[in-house]
Image (cartoon, coloured by chain):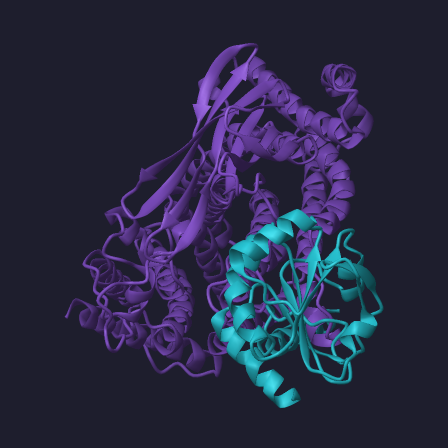
Chain colours: A cyan, B purple
């Protein structure tokens, strides 16, 4: 019995040791290395935004955001910068058209196209549980990278490197 | 210059403590070549650590930004009190405080005249060896006297969340508790070497003292989280909160067991095992906080080197204790039989419940790490898991607490006990029915828990009246009885407080217009407006809310959002109107784009005050036991 306890104790220590090499703040996505999920929502311009629109053989960024989300404001400048180099698609979660128009008027619009995820359906499909979240999609429509939280300046640089590689 | 001196003294601590470590290691290998006076060594180690700590404190007060730790965790604009408390508001300084407390306990133990010189020598050898492991960790991985080059003109500031009186005193209390268990470990290990049963009387006061400090430390941390974080709660099942609860639970089991061990000379091995386990769990807590293996609001820094070192420290101290214990137990088998219906039986049940709760919390806390390493999946274990496991355990636990104090030593009979406390039982039934009748609209679980908490308090009161009747005078009541009554009532108060502020809380989140009234419970909360206030090192947006009940103005609450100048950080200062029936709690959020509305979060947290009173009762109970054990030792 006592030796069994010692074995368990050693096992726990080994797990702790292995755990030291992992960064607990990195949250993986089930979508990584998989195709973008099926979804179809209305778009800001009045048409629809669906999975097919994102499969156009181009590397792109998909950003989940909302005008009511303060951290989204923090990353806005970084998105404006990125949009000069690569198409950025926005999916606005639970936002009204009016609020979004005001948001773009005040802060500028970095998005190629914006989907209106009014009921949060697309967010569920994409496994988004907080705002903002950002995905990088490669030419084949595969999710290559996910970032949770606002994109800071250093994240922008990191994302630019990934995009360069994918292009 | 002062900082250099600090490092020299720290190095001297390393050198001196290494002598004890070498002595212990060599002895472990079967040789005995060194012979130092451990008492003198301990005093010198304490003096050097204290001087080193004073040097670091002076450097903080002097805003010496040539030191890396000060440039990152202090600022010349910081109020003096926070420059002082900033010493332990970071990893390096706080671990030096850890060491200081550890050496202080060694020093205190060395001055005790009631311990035989050989036993004292043995205990101090272990304690100084523990100091060696900690000081080498400081010197090699977490040196607070590390220079920053080039030194900045201004420091980055202390984390604004830590610029608070609650947080200023929370860590020292917590460390006095955590590190207090080191001397308990040392005494137990030494007792195994010396094969002595006299250690129980020596051990007892240290167990109570460390437990009191840990209780206060956890209580203070919880109180801080309640009013500073602005989340409306007092306990979030955060890994670090859990880590502090683990040694508290095993220490609570220990302080019950040590009573039997001392009185009946049984369960002595179990007392040793609990002492070792409690210190191991304290170290585990330190590992979880300092290594960054888990996501927590407390995480200091994610530094694998430090993590590996603490893991080595945890492994070596644990293995040393466990191997010593296994050998000791082989040679000292205890043969005894405990009847379930007896005081010993009830205390054993208490141990089983305390350990089951600790084990459950341990599993819930480290499971995310296991899942990440073994299955590469990230999960988080939160309140629903802990509540669903703990709630069923509470029932037998509370029944044990009610019956335990009325049970006789050696052997008793359930029917006889019930007969002895028939008046109490009748009052408990009556109390339960009345409580149910008054609160029948509330969730069933809340009514049950308020009844359980109330029953514990009533039974403690009954016990008190019974003893008072027998002894006639208050002064004649034994301290250990007062201790038990206070501590058990404290648990009752805690259960009621926790139930009220979790199950029964009401919450309203809204955009509130200036001039608008929000009603919650039987209060009207009228938003007067927001004004700008300048603090010593921050700018504050201070909201003002009239609290009105039955058209009568009770008070004006002023929650704040503070913008700290140097770190560009924002903190929430909740405003709380506290009464026995509950707390009205307001946190101010963001301003709406129209500038006339603000996000306001208003809670009514029933019975929250009872939690803090419960903690005071628990600590007071501990104090009585402590005094009692100090007196009995003589």
| In the displayed structure image, the side of residue B156 where residue B178 appears, left or right | right
Q: Nearer the viewer, residue B545 or B596?
A: B596
| Residue in view at x 66 percent, y 23 percent | B459
Q: Residue furthest top?
A: B551
The C terminus of chain B sits in image quarter: top left
Q: Nearer the viewer, residue A63 or A46?
A: A46
Q: Residue furthest left?
A: B1
Residue B438's image quarter? top right
Q: Residue B241: x percent and y percent? A: 56, 52
| Residue in view at x 77 percent, y 73 percent | A31
Q: Nearer the viewer, residue B129 or B441?
A: B441
Q: Is residue A142 above or below residue B423?
A: below
Q: Residue B568: x percent and y percent? A: 38, 56
| Residue in view at x 61 percent, y 31 percent | B497
Residue A47's image quarter? bottom right
Q: Is residue A120 above or below residue B370?
A: above
Q: Residue B15: x percent and y percent? A: 29, 77
Note whether residue B529 is visible: yes
Note whether residue B278 is visible: no
């Amino acid at each position: 019995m006592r030796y069994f306890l010692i074995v368990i104790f050693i096992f726990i220590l080994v797990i702790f040791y292995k755990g030291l090499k992992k960064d607990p703040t990195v949250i993986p996505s089930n979508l990584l290395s998989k195709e973008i999920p099926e979804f179809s929502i209305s778009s800001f311009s009045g048409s629809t935004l669906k999975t097919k629109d994102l499969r156009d053989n181009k590397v792109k960024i998909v950003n989940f955001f909302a005008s009511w989300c303060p951290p989204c404001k923090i990353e806005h400048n970084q998105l404006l910068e990125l949009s000069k180099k690569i198409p950025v698609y926005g999916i606005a979660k639970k936002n009204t058209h009016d609020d979004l128009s005001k948001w773009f008027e005040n802060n500028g619009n970095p998005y190629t196209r914006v989907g209106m995820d009014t009921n949060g359906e697309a967010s569920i499909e994409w496994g988004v549980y907080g705002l903002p979240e950002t995905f990088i999609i490669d030419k084949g429509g595969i999710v290559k990278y996910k970032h949770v939280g606002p994109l800071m300046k250093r994240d922008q640089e990191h994302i630019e490197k990934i995009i360069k590689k994918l292009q | 210059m002062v900082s250099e001196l600090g490092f020299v003294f720290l190095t001297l601590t390393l050198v001196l403590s290494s002598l004890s470590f070498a002595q212990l290691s060599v002895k472990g290998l079967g040789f005995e070549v060194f012979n130092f006076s451990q008492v003198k060594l301990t005093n010198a180690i304490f003096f050097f650590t204290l001087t080193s700590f004073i040097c670091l404190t002076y450097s903080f007060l002097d805003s010496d930004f040539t030191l890396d730790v000060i440039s990152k965790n202090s600022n010349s604009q910081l109020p003096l009190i926070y420059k002082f408390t900033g010493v332990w508001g970071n990893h390096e300084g706080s671990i030096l405080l850890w060491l200081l407390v550890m050496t202080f306990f060694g020093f205190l133990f060395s001055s005790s005249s009631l311990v035989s010189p050989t036993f004292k020598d043995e205990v101090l050898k272990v304690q100084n060896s523990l100091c060696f492991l900690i000081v080498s960790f400081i010197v090699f991985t977490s040196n607070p006297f590390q220079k920053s080059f080039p030194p900045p003109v201004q420091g980055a500031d202390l984390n604004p969340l830590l610029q608070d009186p609650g947080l200023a005193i929370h860590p020292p209390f917590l460390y006095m508790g955590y590190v207090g268990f080191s001397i308990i470990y040392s005494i137990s290990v030494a007792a195994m070497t010396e094969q002595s049963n006299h250690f129980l009387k020596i051990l007892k006061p240290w167990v109570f003292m460390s437990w009191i400090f840990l209780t206060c430390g956890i209580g203070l941390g919880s109180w801080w989280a309640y009013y500073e974080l602005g989340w409306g709660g007092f306990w979030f099942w955060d890994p670090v909160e859990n880590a502090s609860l683990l040694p508290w639970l095993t220490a609570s089991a220990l302080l019950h067991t040590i009573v039997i061990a001392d009185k009946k000379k049984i369960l002595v091995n179990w007392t040793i095992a609990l002492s070792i386990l409690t210190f191991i769990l304290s170290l585990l807590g330190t590992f979880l906080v300092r290594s960054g293996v888990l996501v927590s609001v407390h995480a200091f820094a994610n530094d694998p080197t430090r993590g590996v070192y603490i893991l080595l420290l945890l492994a070596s101290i644990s293995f040393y204790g466990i191997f010593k214990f296994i050998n000791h137990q082989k040679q000292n088998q205890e043969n005894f039989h405990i009847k379930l219906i007896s005081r010993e039986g009830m205390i054993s049940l208490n141990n089983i419940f305390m350990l089951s709760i600790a084990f459950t919390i341990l599993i819930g806390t480290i499971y995310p790490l296991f899942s990440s390493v073994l299955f590469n999946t990230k999960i988080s274990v939160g309140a629903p898991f802990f509540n669903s496991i703990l709630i069923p355990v509470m029932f037998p636990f509370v029944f044990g607490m009610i019956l335990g104090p009325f049970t006789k030593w050696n052997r008793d009979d359930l029917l006889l006990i019930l007969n002895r406390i028939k008046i109490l039982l009748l009052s408990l039934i009556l109390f339960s029915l009345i409580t149910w009748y008054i609160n029948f609209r509330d969730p069933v679980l809340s009514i049950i828990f308020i009844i359980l908490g109330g029953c514990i308090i009533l039974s403690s009161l009954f016990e008190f009246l019974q003893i008072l009747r027998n002894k006639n005078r208050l002064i004649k009541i034994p301290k250990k009885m007062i201790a038990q009554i206070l501590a058990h009532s404290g648990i009752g108060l805690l259960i009621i407080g926790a139930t009220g502020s979790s199950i029964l809380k009401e919450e309203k989140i809204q955009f509130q217009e200036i001039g608008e009234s929000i009603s919650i419970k039987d209060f009207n909360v009228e938003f007067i407006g927001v004004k700008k206030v300048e603090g010593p090192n921050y700018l504050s947006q201070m909201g003002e809310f009239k609290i009105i009940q039955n058209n009568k103005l009770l008070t004006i609450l002023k929650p704040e959002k503070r913008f700290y100048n140097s770190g560009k950080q924002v903190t929430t200062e909740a405003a709380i109107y506290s009464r026995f029936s509950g707390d009205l709690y307001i946190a101010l959020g963001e301003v709406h784009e129209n500038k006339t509305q603000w996000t306001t979060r208003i809670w009514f947290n029933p019975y929250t005050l009872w939690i803090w009173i419960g903690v005071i009762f628990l600590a007071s109970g501990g104090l009585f036991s402590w005094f009692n054990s100090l007196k009995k030792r003589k």
